[in-house]
Image (spheres, grey):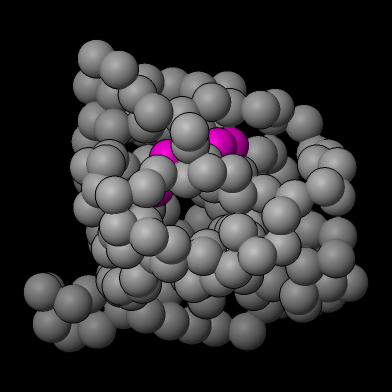
Amino acid sequence: MRFLLTLLTAAAFALPSHANDSLKKVAAELDGYRFEFPCQDPMPENPKPGADGISARKTDDPATNDKFTDTKKFGGEPGKRYKVTLRVRGVVEPMMYKDGQQVGERFYVGGSPNNATYNIYQLTVSSPASHFFFNRDDKVGHRIFTIDYTATIEIEGGATLTLHGNGQNGRMITNFSKLVVPDIAPAPQPYNGQFIQLNVLDVVEVK
């Protein structure tokens, strides 16, 4: 199966600032988007290692419990394709996926979730039809960690972008280590829960 992406690196770095700013505007709906899973309770002064907690997104309705979906429209011209380079940063718990392609340590292309309780962070592109997960791991567990990597995906002009977060069970691993992602709010304070922020670094038209 051919996947339309190239992972540039799993290291934390920014690309050279030669990007075409006019082209970057076609991806404005993605730039700065945040998946957020806040904790319901305040962060303790001295959190217990491995502690889990109740998601502030939890409801009493099984159809909406602890999940959200946002729909965005990609810019550009229909019929044209663009390579969009994203920088992915955040504080997350691990999640397993299957039947797709692992790219780097944390990025996963295609496939489906392979666990019924840990948080899912997913981006779906209508054209070319594809979907991606951002917090891949070999195993789940009561761990929390920061992510900072870049990935390049292809998106057709006018495509629908669906950003979906699913906590699955109304609970999450809290940010018990009080991890902070530099330069990302609420830094220098730790986020009380989990989040991923996407930033667009570059957009190039596919010739």
Q: Is residue 122 magenta?
A: no
Q: Position of residue 52 (x, y in %)?
A: 50, 60
The vertical placement of 63 against 26, above or below, is below
Q: Nearer the viewer, residue 23 or 192?
A: 23
Does residue 64 appear left or right of residue 183 in this picture? left
Q: Nearer the viewer, residue 106 or 32?
A: 32
**The residue positioned farthest toward the front in the image shown:** 207
Q: Say which quarter of the image contains residue 152.
A: top right
The number of discs equals 0
Q: Name the quadrant of the N terminus.
A: top left
The vertical placement of 182 against 5, above or below, is below
Q: Position of residue 147 (x, y in %)?
A: 67, 44
Please tell me which residue is depicted at 32% across the width and 63% down the height of the picture.
158
Please tell me which residue is depicted at 48% across the width and 83% down the height of the picture.
40
Q: Position of residue 109 (x, y in %)?
A: 37, 31
**The residue positioned farthest toward the top in the image shown:** 1
One can see residue 35 in this view = no
Q: Position of residue 78 (x, y in %)?
A: 30, 57
Please tell me which residue is depicted at 69% across the width and 72% down the height of the picture.
191
Does residue 56 appear left or right of residue 158 in this picture? right
One can see residue 1 in this view = yes
Please tell me which residue is depicted at 52% across the width and 76% down the height of the picture.
38
The vertical placement of 129 against 25, above or below, is above
Q: Nearer the viewer, residue 164 or 153?
A: 153
Q: Nearer the viewer, residue 72 or 81?
A: 81
Q: Say which quarter of the image contains residue 179.
A: bottom right
Q: Which residues are magenta?
A: 151-155
Q: Main secondary structure of the magenta part?
A: strand
The vertical placement of 159 against 1, above or below, is below
Does residue 118 appear left or right of residue 5 in this picture? left
